[in-house]
Image (cartoon, grey):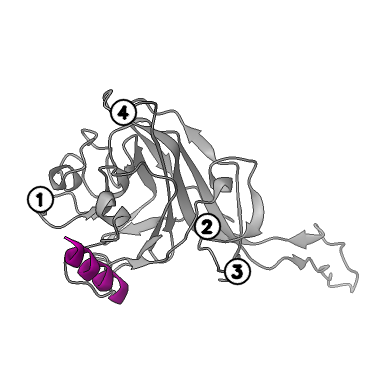
């Protein structure tokens, strides 16, 4: 799992921190939803270790054609409107593209499909975050919105001026607040143009936390050697040629060749260079 925390001021992201042996949570791509203790998939951690009780509606499957995108609004929760902060701007919706990424703002004018820095930072793509930028033939993407569940308390009777009491209008009051939007590409079929037998699939899941603007990406089963990119993009074209996080290098144990604020990233990078 890669966890991207925003820089102070929200103008960018810190180098991602790494959690090994994470697992995609299938409940965010199927089932009826409901209450549960939040668990981001890290093996060896206690479910609900953050002490967050959440609830969500049944995940919504998105019918996306090849090279397509659709807008998904972030709903209110508990009567509270919410948004997701991304690179200094707040957004009340996101555009989910068939090829493993989401964009913020107006719908993209074109859907990128190549795992290149040019596609990652494309102006046509705009401000975006790639979970798994690759050519996905059948994306099989689902989205759901998590709400933080507050304490429920019994409604107290109201007292009239005469001293008499009215009966409570309800047995209890349940408070919820917006928490995160979860996007899952579950066993998405990867386009191979006939170069491989069968239909290789890839699974990835991302949590977009409304309060903090943090993004966590959990990888499921991926085809060996898949050409794909993960990470944020301003989408102004000026970052073309900049370093990007390649999934193939991540699978090989090399997260980034660039300077990092994360000791684990640096260690992985040094090991990868020594092996070459």
Q: Nearer the viewer, mark 3 or mark 2?
A: 3
Q: Is residue 264 magenta?
A: yes
Disc 4 from disc 1: Cα separation: 30 Å
Q: Quadrant of the C terminus?
A: bottom left
Q: What is the magenta range? A: 263-276
Q: Quadrant of the N terminus?
A: bottom left
Q: Position of residue 233 (x, y in %)?
A: 22, 53
Q: Position of residue 85 (x, y in %)?
A: 34, 59
| SS class, disc 3 | loop
Vertical arrangement, residue 243 with respect to residue 66, above or below:
below
Furthest-right residue in view? Answer: 164
Q: Within 10 Å of the Cα at label 4, are there few (<14), some (14-19), or many (20+) other Cα atoms?
A: few
Tag of residue 46: 3
In depth, the one of 255 and 58 nearer the eye is 255
Pointer 4: what residue?
A: 196
Pointer 2: what residue?
A: 80
Q: Is residue 41 magenta?
A: no
Pointer 1: what residue?
A: 240
Q: Taking the image as drawn, is residue 7 in sight? A: no
- Which of the 4 image quarters holds residue 18? bottom left
From the viewer's perspective, is 253 left or right of 116? Answer: right
- Which of the 4 image quarters holds residue 216? bottom left
Q: Nearer the viewer, mark 2 or mark 4?
A: 4
Contact, CB < 8 Å: mark 3 with mark 4? no
From the viewer's perspective, is 24 left or right of 263? Answer: right
Furthest-front residue in view? Answer: 275
């Amino acid at each position: 799992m890669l966890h991207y925390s925003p820089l102070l001021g929200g103008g960018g992201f810190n180098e991602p921190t790494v959690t090994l042996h994470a697992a995609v949570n299938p409940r965010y791509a199927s089932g009826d939803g409901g209450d549960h203790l939040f668990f981001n998939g890290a093996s060896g951690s206690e479910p609900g270790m953050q002490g967050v009780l959440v609830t969500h509606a049944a995940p919504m499957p998105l019918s996306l054609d090849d090279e397509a995108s659709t807008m998904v609004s972030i709903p209110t929760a508990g009567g509270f409107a919410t948004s997701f902060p991304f690179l200094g701007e707040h957004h009340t919706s996101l555009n989910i593209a068939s090829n493993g990424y989401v964009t913020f703002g107006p719908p993209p004018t074109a859907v990128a499909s190549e795992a290149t820095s040019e596609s990652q930072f494309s102006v046509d793509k705009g401000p975006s975050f790639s979970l798994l930028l690759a050519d996905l033939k059948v994306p099989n993407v689902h989205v759901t919105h998590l709400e933080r569940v507050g304490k429920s308390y019994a409604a107290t009777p109201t007292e009239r001026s005469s001293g008499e009491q009215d009966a409570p209008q309800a047995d209890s009051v349940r408070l919820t607040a917006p928490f995160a939007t979860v996007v899952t590409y579950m066993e998405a079929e990867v386009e191979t143009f006939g170069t491989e037998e069968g239909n290789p699939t890839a699974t990835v899941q991302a949590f977009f936390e409304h309060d903090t603007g943090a993004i966590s990406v959990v990888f499921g089963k991926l085809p060996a050697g898949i050409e794909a990119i993960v990470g944020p993009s301003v989408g102004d074209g000026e970052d073309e040629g900049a370093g990007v996080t390649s999934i193939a290098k991540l699978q090989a144990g090399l997260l980034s060749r660039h300077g990092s604020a994360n000791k684990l990233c640096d260690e992985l990078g040094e090991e990868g260079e020594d092996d070459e």
